[in-house]
Image (cartoon, coloured by chain):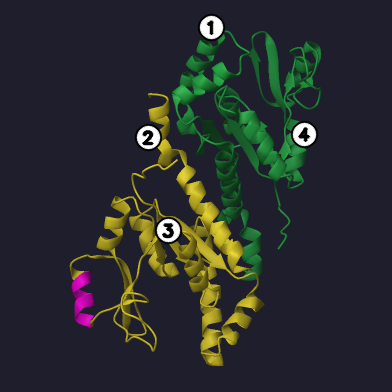
Chain colours: A yellow, B green
Amino acid sequence: MIRKKEKGQLIVLSGPSGVGKSTVIAELLGQRRDIYFSVSYTTRQPRVGEQNGVNYNFVSREEFEGMIQRDELLEYAEYVSNYYGTSLKTIQEKLDAGIDVLLDIEVQGAAKVRSRCPDALFIFIIPPSFEELSRRLHGRHTDSEEVIQGRLEKARQEATEISKYDYLVINDKVSNAVSEIESILTAAQCRVENRKSIYEGVFAL
Amino acid sequence: MIRKKEKGQLIVLSGPSGVGKSTVIAELLGQRRDIYFSVSYTTRQPRVGEQNGVNYNFVSREEFEGMIQRDELLEYAEYVSNYYGTSLKTIQEKLDAGIDVLLDIEVQGAAKVRSRCPDALFIFIIPPSFEELSRRLHGRHTDSEEVIQGRLEKARQEATEISKYDYLVINDKVSNAVSEIESILTAAQCRVENRKSIYEGVFAL
């Protein structure tokens, strides 16, 4: 039975660097093609292989500051002298059209979304162990030991914010993590407040 | 990864007569053998084919009133001169052992459970339409037209309480309803508060 959704669900996904979030997201989007993945805006230079509009929307500092001034961003942060942010307009249009929107943002950005969109679903992904997170970061062979230690330290700091999230998903295996996220999304659709028009229709309330 | 649960989840399932709740429950319990189904106590006479300890625990009026006096019931109601109730002791033992417990109870009983166990998961099952509910009740060929009209009227009354439940499941097809309930149970396991010891362990918080 296909039921037209009145409003899309905003889904916020956070998790430490190295947890495998991008792989989980790619797998999830492959299985749930109805979800719109929100591409962030940034002022940093694209890295080799990164595509505009796919990995990020690459904009100038001037353009970004214009978006800030016109209050067009749901959240933004400055990070190593570069801006990163989420466009409010695109998200709002999708949600209004009944489309679920997925955001991949850090703990601080998530806190801003929480204050503006309390109905969003907040999911935090963790590794099965701290040792495994370290192994995954070392296995990438892209960062120096110092950078890796910095990421691990940041992971520990961010973990103190987990209790503010709704759900915790453990990425021991990508398929398990994706399956848990899918269950969380299905359960959200089943929430009584999201099906008010259905039961009111059935029972003529 | 097998994770020992600290405490079982209490699940309350309600829904109108004729919605197909028993079939959904049987299917769910077949797939989730880790769930304990709480068999109610009643003072009414067993019907043909009903087994003691399976459909109900059949007890005398004296025994039931003893349970009331000793505060051994989580909830009970008197219905057409017979008592129906749920044993608190059995449920508590299972939950303490980390076992999920499923209760099939009416709206009034659910209200009592809500006040005593606010952490329980409250799920209401509805038919895809009121006409379909009527069709299913007529299709049973067990009740008179008067009884069926009474059940439909009761369904409408009970529906006014749906907003007090957490989740609404639509039984258009048994497999869909079971799959939605399974997602709801998985999502509940993923709730941050139910995985506190896991993330505190991973990040040594």
For this rendering, which residue is in front, B19 or B90?
Answer: B19
Segment colored magenta: A61-68
Q: Is residue B34 left or right of residue A189?
A: right
Q: Position of residue B142 (x, y in %)?
A: 63, 13
Secondary element under disc 3, as helix, strand or loop, is strand
Q: Is residue A192 left or right of residue A93?
A: right
Q: CA distance from mark 4 to mark 3?
A: 39 Å
User: Is there CB contact under 8 Å for labels 2 and 4?
Assistant: no
Secondary element under disc 2, as helix, strand or loop, is helix
Q: Position of residue B140 (x, y in %)?
A: 61, 18
Residue hosting label 1? B146
Badge 2: few (under 14), some or many (20 or more) residues near its Cα, within 10 Å? some
* Chain-order first, disc 3 or disc 2: 3
Q: Amino acid at mark 2?
A: Ser
Q: CA distance from mark 3 to mark 2?
A: 22 Å
Q: Amino acid at mark 4?
A: Thr
Quarter-of-image position of residue A19: bottom right
Q: Is residue A65 magenta?
A: yes
Q: Residue at x 37, y 85 (%)?
A: A80
Q: Is residue B73 magenta?
A: no
Residue hosting label 2? A197
Q: Which chain does tag 2 point to? A: A
Badge 3: few (under 14), some or many (20 or more) residues near its Cα, within 10 Å? some
Label ID, residue A11:
3
Q: Amino acid at mark 3?
A: Ile
For this rendering, which residue is in front, B169 or B103?
Answer: B169
